[in-house]
Image: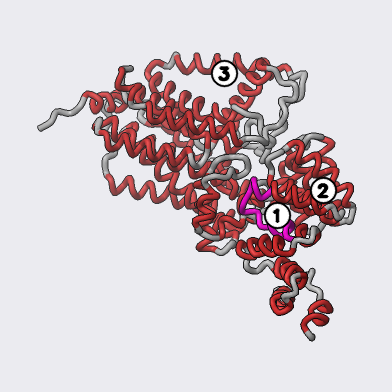
Amino acid sequence: MTPAHPAVHHGARYAAARGNTARTRDPALHRQILFLIVAGAFAVHASGLGNGFIYFDDPEGVVDNVSIRDFSTTNIGHWFTTPLQFMYTPLVYVSYAIDYLFGQGAIGIYHFSNLMLHLANVVLVFLLFRRLTERAFVACFVAGAFAIHPVNVDTVAWISARSNLLATLFSLAAILVYLRYVRSLRRQPLAWSVVLFGLAALSKSTAVALPLVLFLVDHVQGRRPSRRLFLEKIPFAVIAAVTVLVALNVRQDVIPPQGYTVADRILLTCSAVVNHLVQAVYPFHLSLAYAYPHKPFPWYLYAFPLVLAAGGAALWLVRPARRIVVFGLGFFAVTIAPTQAVLLIDGYHANRYAYLPYLGLFFICGYLADAALRHRDRRLRAGAIGAMAVFAVLFTTLTVIRNTAWRNTETIMSDAIAKEPGVALAYSSRGIARFRGGDYTGATTDLQRTEELDPDFVLAHHYLGLIKYYNGDYTGALGELDYEVSRLPTFAVAYSERGKTKIALKDYSGAYADLSTAIAYDPQLTEAYYSRGVAAIGLGDPRGAISDLNTAIGLIPQYADAYHQRGVAESRLGDIGAACADWNTAMSLGSPDANTSLAENHCGG
């Protein structure tokens, strides 16, 4: 018989440190408890299944994303070569395409998938911490807190947070399989862990923190630093390095530094960490986005580094829990760190950033709760039970309430504006929702407020340009879109809208150039092919127009206006039969551009 490897004995150190108290080993009981946790998570999040789309990232990622409507070779290639919202997340494309395959665009399927991914993550959290600690109670505590914490609503309720859910799923699975490797030191689990990490990186770039998490796993398992310990992390480090390079290459929507120095950035990071720590136990006043502090900073921001240092030192002094504290705080720190690498428009401590990092804090709390429940003092045990019951009821209630705020764009953005009135993003997104609902006046008010708060907020310029276009102010629209292109020179939709505006101004050559640029940056942008076809007609190139309009119809077979314009191009070539067929199709599909008299004149009524 092969003797057990020393790593197996090291892995039991945590359990040994817990004393000789008997541990729950009944697998059936574990499954029942896990089932109750998952059922509870489903119950508190189920009200979000009827929520709508949010007009911040959801339009580009899902609503208007034609590529997710078909699993074609072209689309699959597009997913793996084109960033989604300035992030390289090809597996998010894949997940959306699966949703579309089963739901044909129905919004409920996207919310259902988000919830199912969260429940899968709850299961993985339970399995991971049970294997990591060999304590069923700690695993139940961490999984339960993760399942119902109000801060996690933003990740589950927002369809565009799918990347967070997927990256967490694969990261947890990678750690779980890595633990199997630590216990056996066989190569196969290590190889699978590397593969799972690769899938996490293809879901979201913040997964790059995983190699550091694995060192923390080594620490809590009692593995001492060695040459092997570092060599086995090389494949993970390579994937992490490539992920960082790709992320830096495609990321472009970072807000200006606002005059922040390196020291300011450190203070902002400390502020974000403190806010996350507070919200872990006091999850009130939650908002979709949080305003950046303006300089000069308030005095308390300068105290945050000292607060964090003092808190860490105090926990370090608790010698029996030192290994747990190092793992828990280390896990939180290294997984929250990538979210602080750039300053994003929705704030520097958005709630979804804490989805995975909070597991480290829950672990420490679970350890302390476990110790309290095993203490001889009955009052301490009763107090621990009472505190857990209060927090369970509080978190459940707040999670249900938070889900109501995510009902639609109007509700979540109005909620954010009420709590954080200085955030430009909230006004912009509400303005976009109002624009899509046909309320151009309300949209203009919100978008102008966005520009007052942040004159460089590019998305506001984009939609103000669209409003001016629809109101017939083509020159004004062109000015807004010119600015957008200057700020986001690789944003395909900006070139497409500017090309459409130039068509309205009869600048067909300028339009054709813009639309060609849009297609070069996004070969799946159907609207750009349609508009370039119209521009080609204006330039006297009906054959080129037909080619582009064929592509547009191929991407969206029910594209009524494209049939109408193709009919125009065919009539220019003298192919009246084909033109009549296309005009009739356009009319049957309800094209607002379809000209009945044109069809009657050429096709004999």
* 428 relative to 587, above or below: above
Q: Which element is circle 1 on?
A: helix
Which image quarter holds the N terminus?
Answer: top left
Mark nearer the N terminus (3 vs 2): 3
Of the two numbered discs 1 and 3 in the rendering, the one whose residue sits closer to the viewer:
1
Residue 56 screen position, x and y as percent: 68, 46
* Among the 4 quarters of the image, the one containing residue 161: top right
Q: Residue at x 33, y 39 (%)?
A: 192
Relative height, residue 288 to residue 534 (above, below): above
- View extreme (bottom): residue: 604
Q: Which amino acid type corresponds to the residue marked 2 in the rendered image?
A: Gly
Q: Which residues are magenta?
A: 518-533
Total residue callouts: 3
Q: Nearer the viewer, residue 381 or 184?
A: 184
Residue indicated by mark 2: 465
Q: Amino acid at mark 3?
A: Leu
Relative image position of residue 280 (x, y in whole percent):
56, 33
Asked if residue 528 lies in the magenta stretch, the reply is: yes
Whether residue 418 is visible here, answered yes or no, is no
User: Label 3: few (<14), some or many (≥20) within 10 Å?
Assistant: some
Q: State the image coordinates of residue 465 (x, y, percent, origin top left).
A: 82, 48
Task: Return the residue at label 3.
Answer: 308
Q: Residue furthest left?
A: 1
For the C terminus, give its image quadrant. bottom right
Q: Residue at x 75, y 52 (%)?
A: 512
User: Is 185 covered by the magenta stretch?
Assistant: no
Residue 151 image-quadrant placement: top right
Identify which residue, 181 or 509, lies in the foreground: 509
First in sequence: mark 2 vs mark 1: 2
Label 2: few (<14), some (14–19) or many (≥20) C-alpha neighbours in 10 Å: many
Closer to the camera, 494 or 335?
494
